[in-house]
Image: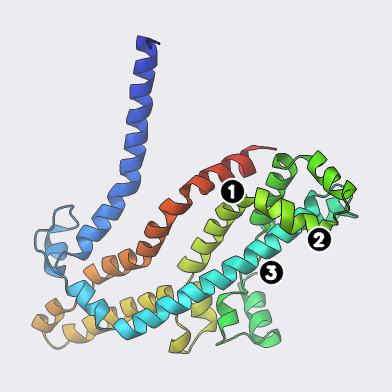
Amino acid sequence: MIKSKSYRRYQIIINGIMILITLIMVLPLVLLFMSSISSDASLLVNGYSFFPKEFSLDAYRYILANGGTLFRAYGMTILVTVIGTGLNLLLSASMAYALSVKKLPFRNIISFYVFFTMLFNGGLVPSYLMWSNVFHIKNTIWALILPNFLLSAMNVILVRTFFTTSIPEPLYEAAKIDGASYFYIFPKIVLPMGKPILVTVGLFTGLSYWNDWTNGLYYINESKLYTVQLLLNKMIQNAQALQVNASASSANTLMKIPTVSVRMAIAFVALLPILVIYPFLQKYFAEGIALGAVKG
């Protein structure tokens, strides 16, 4: 089949737009990495560049000097992300499944309550007082899991929409005729068929847990509970403190402290695991977005 000239022009335009969008997304990451392997003096004089004027690994040496602490923080981050994402998926999928059942009593009222929480919340101060004084989660691993991300209204709505529009109602009826209860249908039918949207929601939630540092800032004082984001934020503050102290004593010492490039290196180190994992989940992510958000 011979393609028309207009079709080929259309393909060229679309491919050009997609290449441009890809470059817009990729180039900042490249600039981030290049800046992390540049010397501070070069960055201060020449600014950020895709081609380092003066190659230096001082920023990564600074991070590796805190290697034991960093690996422990990575372990804590992975633990929090796995537990938090798993609990979020379980709660979100359970609630979404219940709301997808048309015969559920007070279904509309519960759905409104879920939506209402997307618009209003108690605020930072009441939340802090509740988690600290009522639930006493301060300086525990639960301080990194429970606030903010344990159950998301957006996730519930996405999963409910997928369950409602993508799982045929006759499938439920056939299972009920065979004697299956709602508690049997959920793990045996709904969860396997909801894999695309669950992976998508899991990726959103996992990113939220991985990138979170505010919960640690509010509720964590013990260094053994630092996540990688909280630890790297502390390292930036320490580098700034060293810079201030060095400026008062010696300009030569100041030049040896990687205050600018270390920020780039820290950001790149924090992004690296997500960049590695995402390609394996991309297929499910795209399918889940298409089916869970566009339909309905």
Quote the CA–CA distance across marks 1 and 2: 21 Å
Judge from the rendering whether residue 181 lies leftward or rightward of residue 8; answer left or right.
Answer: right
Q: Which mark is residue 183?
A: 2
Q: Which amino acid type is marked by label 1?
A: Pro
Q: Quadrant of the N terminus?
A: top left
Residue 22 x %, y %: 34, 41
At 21% from the left and 73% from the top, the residue drawn is: 59
**Residue type (three-letter) at the residue carrying disc 2:** Phe
Q: Quadrant of the C terminus?
A: top right
How many residues crowd mark 2 within 10 Å: few (<14), some (14–19), many (20+)? Answer: few
Q: Secondary structure at mark 3?
A: loop
Q: Residue furthest front?
A: 178
Q: Residue at x 36, y 31 (%)?
A: 17
**Viewer-closest of 139 and 70:** 70
Q: Which residue is mark 1?
A: 196
Q: Is residue 182 left or right of residue 195?
A: right
Image quadrant assignment for residue 180:
bottom right
Residue 140 in the image: above or below residue 169: below
The way the protein has been coloured in the rendering is rainbow
Residue type pointed to by label 3: Gly
State the CA–CA distance, disc 1 to disc 3. 33 Å
Q: Which residue is mark 3?
A: 122
Where disc 2 sits, the SS reads helix
Residue 115 visible here: no
116 lies left or right of 45 = right
